[in-house]
Image (cartoon, rainbow, N blue to C red):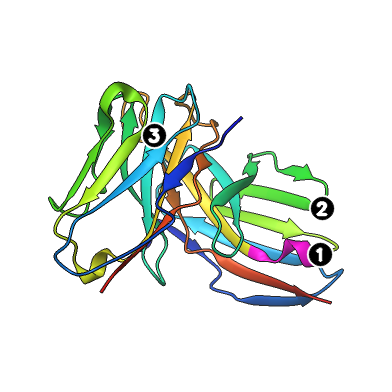
Amino acid sequence: RKEVEQDPGPFNVPEGATVAFNCTYSNSASQSFFWYRQDCRKEPKLLMSVYSSGNEDGRFTAQLNRASQYISLLIRDSKLSDSATYLCVVKLGSGGSNYKLTFGKGTLLTVNP
Amino acid sequence: EAGVTQFPSHSVIEKGQTVTLRCDPISGHDNLYWYRRVMGKEIKFLLHFVKESKQDESGMPNNRFLAERTGGTYSTLKVQPAELEDSGVYFCASSQEQGRATEAFFGQGTRLTVV
């Protein structure tokens, strides 16, 4: 089983649509969770952290269910500029203060006019 | 403030040659990471430096890969000799502190093609 699994996509949605991405992780000891965004041929950039209580940033809402080891990202009222690959990322400590990021394969979103 | 910079942005080399990738982290960031994305696969961890020390190199694929961070500033990743399966995008990331919620900033990557 992969450490981090995401919807394979791609997702093609019209402007204004609501789209949801799902992600599961295999290691129950994982400690922090993030959604990164990666534009074509660019570097990954942090979109938002994900907290157990759920968190919202404008049109973006992230949820974490530790019991199910499941993370989600909801984008409301999607814009053309939301077109990108969305990466589910999990941070796990491997001893002491050493942490590393584990990435999902990413889900490509295309928002169409 | 300058972000994480990587050089070169692209490199095309022949199988058996040597290539050295360079990463300059954000000034003051003690933590430096190398990641790689092979086509069609997810971004995978290679190794982690804290200052000049290798903290975790569990992701290094084999002994053809050598990473250094002399003086705890910039880092190099050398591939010698390069093989076809080494092709991919190599990302460097840095962070100031090491902690659960600390954000890692990525460079734009070096696209390596081995022919």
Please give the name of the residue rendered at 41% of the width and 24% of the height, measured from the top-left corner: B30
Tell me the SS state at disc 1. Answer: loop
* Extent of the magenta region: A80-84
Query: Please, which chain is the residue tagged with disc 3 on?
Result: B
Residue A47 percent across, percent down from the top left: 65, 47
Badges 3 and 2, same chain: no
Inspect the image, locate mark 1, and give the three-letter code of the amino acid beneath it. Ser
Q: Which residue is mark 3?
A: B32
State which mark lies toward you, 3 or 2.
3
Q: Can residue A65 be seen? A: no
Asked if marks 2 and 1 touch (Cβ < 8 Å), the reply is yes
Three-letter residue code for mark 3: Leu
The answer to which quarter of the image holds residue A42 is bottom right
Report if the CB atoms under discs 3 and 1 are less than 8 Å apart.
no
The residues tagged by marks 2 and 1 sit, at their Cα atoms, a distance apart of 8 Å
The answer to which quarter of the image holds residue B33 is top left
- Of residue A104 and residue A63, the one placed in the foreground of this image is A104
Mark 2 vs mark 1: tell me if same chain. Answer: yes
Residue topped by disc 1: A78
Q: Is residue B53 above or below residue A88?
A: above
